[in-house]
Amino acid sequence: MSELVKALPCGALLAWITALFIGHAGGLGGTLAVEQMQVMEQSFYWSWPIFLGGTALAWGIMALQA
């Protein structure tokens, strides 16, 4: 369970940085589903598929190290 908690920030960072590059260039990323989200007055690019895949990848790597 602790590996999953440690993997969440890794997945979020990967999703944010990847979506930032794809979205800023004007692309949608196809199946990556990059979209511009707005929270309060801040807008940023985000992708749920990248977040879930990155979190699963980080979790798998950390689980293998244990």
Image: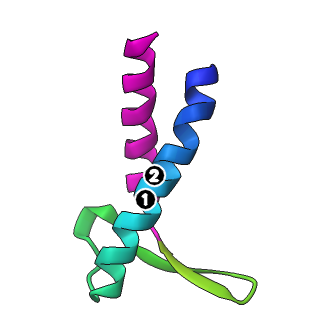
**Tag of residue 49:** none
**Residue at coordinates 36% horizontally, 34% vertically from top-left?**
57
**Residue at coordinates 44% horizontally, 16% vertically from top-left?**
63
**Tag of residue 15:** 1
Name the outermost residue toward the top. Answer: 66
The kind of residue on which mark 2 rests is: Phe
Magenta: main secondary structure: helix
The kind of residue on which mark 1 rests is: Ala
Residue 53 image offset from top left, x and y in percent: 37, 44
| Magenta region includes residue 53 | yes
Colouring scheme applied when the structure was drawn: rainbow
**Tag of residue 51:** 2
Determine contact: label 2, label 1, CB under 8 Å.
Answer: yes
| Magenta region includes residue 31 | no
Position of the N terminus, as image quadrant, is top right
Q: Which of 35 and 22 is in front in this view?
A: 22
Bounds of the magenta span? 46-66
The image quarter containing residue 24 is bottom left
The image quarter containing residue 35 is bottom left
